[in-house]
Amino acid sequence: MTDVLGDVVLTGVRVLGGPPSDVELRDGRITAIRAAGASGAPVTGVTGTGLVMLPALVDLHTHLREPGDEEAETIASGTRAAAAGGYSDVFAMANCSPVTDSPERVRHVAEIAARTASCRVHPVGAITLGLAGRGLAPLATMAHAGARLFSDDGRCVDDPAVLQAALHASRRAGTVIAQHAQCGSLAAHGQINAGQAADRTGLPPWPATAEETIVARDVVLAGATGGRLHVCHVSTAGTVELLRWAKQRGWPVTAEVTPHHLLLTDEQAAAGDTVHKVNPPLRTAADVAALRAALLDGTIDVVATDHAPHPARRKAAGWCDAPFGMLGLETALAVVAEVLGEDGEPDWALIADAMSHRPARIGGIDSTAGRPLAEGEPATFTLVDPKADWLVDPDGHHSLSTNTPFARFRFRHRVVATVVEGRVTADPHGLLATATGSRRSSA
């Protein structure tokens, strides 16, 4: 359930970090944006002085675990986490049990979401049947059932002929192939970044070439087929250069980076806490610097969380036995704002592009999500306190799991409310309570 926002003026909010404005909302839409203090008497006024108003976020890469692993996460819990993190829309990866590799299973995920979700959920279809990397799943019929993005994430489509066929199919259907770039023979049983981290720990190394060789191959295939390729969780400086090369040629290639790859390095992983075990692995400080630069110059298009919940008992296993993955939805905005605001205030317009506008366009949902904050547009936005100075407490998360690498991190920026088409999906401090009253709506 969500509260319905009544007719209201948000006073003093900073749209995309700009000067203070009064934003009028009526019937679930933005009806006016004026300089602060220029509004007439509102039906209801909510003081938002100093809060930054952003378009609600869109995540192209979320693992909701349902169906099949409800101990780790459910669509209900994962989307509560998403709403708390400022998201209006998430793309639910296909590596569930059963795998989302048929139109019936696409519809099944959508039906669960319709009943239980706190944000909009877009099922991602598998590229290959059972994520086995061999026979293509029925991409066209899954697209007809509502899948806009296809990925075997968690596994790479290692066979170039299969990936080429998928790109041909995606071009015909107008969809996107999202590749988990990991050459199986080069990554082998890798556990941690090759180099000093592997040398210090004695763990099996995971070289950058395991990612880069797949990206090099796949961008060429995208150029040859015209199929749209999206590279998941870029982690190396070499991959950045390959993406830059592909984009200079005008090939239909986009890419994402995760918050954790923008902030953390393999030095944290080498300390041995399995909360830092992730796929692909945390890389060097030089890689992190290259990823940040690529986000700033547009070589990397979007930030995606790769939210990957796991129960504590599984993460408590020894390093080689613990699963890969980290939480991301509830801290993503804070991390990205921290990274982009090291020398002052972050570039909020860039954050809106990388976390809302561009992912909505890539995912094919930009008619309803990632919309500009402008008069006549849906009231779909998030409010951020840029002076929150808050400590991450995984026990206070909405996710069923607690495997965040940011536990006890202190961040300046925090989402304080999320609204989707006039429905309040997150409002932990009651900021919008006076504007909702007792009216309710199904999520």
Image (spheres, grey):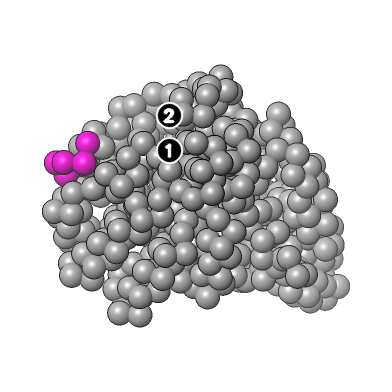
Q: Secondary structure at mark 1?
A: loop
- Pinpoint residue 263: horizontal percent, then vertical percent: 63, 54
Q: Which mark is residue 204?
A: 1
What amino acid type should be assigned to the residue bearing mark 1? Answer: Pro
- Pinpoint residue 281: horizontal percent, then vertical percent: 48, 46
> Where 173 sits versus 70, above or below?
below
Q: Which residues are magenta?
A: 132-137
Foreground mark, 2 or 1?
1
Marks counted in the figure total 2
Q: Which residue is mark 2?
A: 66
> Where 325 sits versus 55, above or below?
above
What amino acid type should be assigned to the residue bearing mark 2? Answer: Glu
Between 380 and 352, the residue placed more toward the observer is 352
Left or right? Give the position of 179 relative to 370: left
Between 397 and 283, the residue placed more toward the observer is 283
Question: Crowding at label 2, few (<14), some or many (≥20) Cα neighbours within 10 Å?
Answer: many
Q: Secondary structure at mark 2?
A: loop
- Pinpoint residue 269: horizontal percent, then vertical percent: 58, 41
Which residue corresponds to the image point at 51% horizontal and 29% vertical from the top-left?
319
